[in-house]
């Protein structure tokens, strides 16, 4: 019997294959950071994690040209695999692992767009053990994915905000601070407060442009958690343009930022950043807001003008 993954509801990955996918990613990650090779990043990463990885290869080559053979290898062990049963593409599953870097849990989200594509890691989130949610699983141990809603305005009857709408809700809030579906905190109200401090200073003023991710290129995988709600992974792009006061020129001294710089530093400089986040989305009807469990942000481009 032939099972069609685009129609049948099947596990995203076989339980025996998941550890192999994790090992392939870890081996590739370590190879990429030893050789500082963008090609290896492309082989094992996608989405926001790959964008960060590409920029890392550029900036680290500026510091250690020719590679970094003494790079301490990353080890991800004690893995628990959260595998949903899904129909259609893309498919995803999550590896909840222990890392040799710290005492936190490293969540690696693997994505696959078709049966012909390899599994690649699209998101990485780092959570302290006490912040890890309890996930809904069935009698066979399969996790429960939130179905993908059509379009950024799609609804999910069980959630306050559909995962596909989270990136837009977040960037809308950063832009105007209105109608926030998010709980107050350093990644929401705190970011707006910090931005206000540098919007206009005696030496420069700053413009911020926040862009939600299209679902096609950067899907928002989500898993149901006990007690209602879901844990969702999403990304966004952020541009920060600093324009100097008359008679002043922008300056960049960090060699890593210099490695990303294009254009001439005449009057302004624009930093492009990508963020990847893990959030707890509350159940529909809850008075709680979306809460950040982890957020990683990295500069991926610098443009002088």
Image (cartoon, helix red, strand yellow):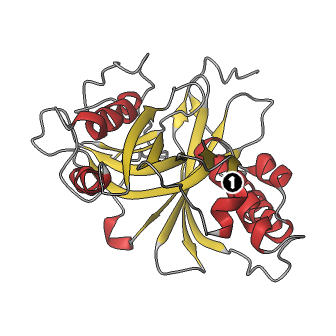
* Location of the N terminus (image quadrant): top right
* Vertical side of 50 occupied by 186: above or below: below
Q: Residue drawn at (82%, 64%), measured in percent from left and top?
A: 36
**Which residue extends farthest front?**
247
Residue 144 located left or right of residue 92 = left
Asked whether 75 or 172 is in front, the reply is 172
Q: Is residue 63 visible?
A: yes
Q: Residue drawn at (30%, 40%), measured in percent from left and top?
A: 174
Asked whether 265 or 109 is in front, the reply is 265
- On the image, the x and y values in percent for residue 241 come to 46, 44
Asked whether 179 or 75 is in front, the reply is 179
Q: Residue drawn at (59%, 47%), measured in percent from left and top?
A: 266
Residue 10 located left or right of residue 161 = right
**Which residue extends farthest left?**
287
* Location of the C terminus (image quadrant): top right
In which quarter of the view is residue 115 placed?
top right
Asked whether 48 or 4 is in front, the reply is 48
- On the image, the x and y values in percent for residue 167 come to 39, 35
In which quarter of the view is residue 150 placed?
top left
- On the image, the x and y values in percent for residue 122 come to 61, 46
Q: Is residue 81 visible?
A: no
- SS label for mark 1: helix
- On the image, the x and y values in percent for residue 92 come to 58, 40
Residue denoted by label 1: 260
Q: Residue drawn at (25%, 24%), measured in percent from left and top?
A: 157
């Amino acid at each position: 019997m032939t099972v069609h993954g685009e129609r049948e509801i099947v596990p995203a990955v076989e339980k025996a294959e998941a550890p192999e996918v994790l090992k392939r990613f870890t081996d590739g990650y370590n190879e990429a950071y030893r050789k500082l090779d963008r090609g290896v990043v492309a082989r094992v990463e996608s989405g926001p994690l790959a964008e960060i990885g590409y920029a890392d290869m550029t900036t680290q080559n500026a510091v250690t040209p020719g590679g970094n053979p003494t790079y301490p290898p990353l080890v991800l062990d004690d893995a628990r695999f959260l595998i949903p049963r899904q129909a259609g593409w893309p498919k995803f599953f999550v590896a909840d692992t222990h890392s040799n870097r710290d005492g936190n849990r490293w969540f690696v989200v693997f994505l696959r767009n078709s049966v012909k594509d390899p599994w690649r890691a699209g998101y990485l989130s780092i959570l302290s053990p006490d912040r890890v949610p309890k996930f809904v699983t069935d009698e066979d141990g399969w996790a429960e994915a939130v179905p993908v809603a059509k379009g950024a305005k799609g609804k999910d009857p069980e959630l306050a905000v559909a995962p596909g709408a989270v990136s837009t809700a977040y960037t809308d809030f950063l832009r105007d601070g209105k109608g926030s579906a998010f709980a107050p905190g350093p990644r929401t109200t705190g970011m707006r407060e910090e931005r206000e401090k540098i919007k206009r200073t005696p030496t420069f003023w700053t413009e911020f442009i926040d862009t939600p991710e299209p679902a096609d290129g950067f899907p928002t995988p989500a898993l149901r958690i006990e007690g209602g709600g879901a844990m969702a992974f999403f990304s966004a792009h952020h541009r920060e343009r600093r324009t100097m006061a008359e008679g002043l020129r922008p300056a960049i001294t960090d060699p890593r930022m210099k490695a990303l710089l294009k254009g001439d530093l005449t009057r302004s400089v624009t930093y492009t950043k990508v963020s990847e986040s893990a959030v707890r989305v509350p159940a529909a009807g809850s008075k709680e807001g979306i809460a950040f469990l982890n957020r990683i942000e990295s500069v991926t481009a610098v443009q002088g003008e």
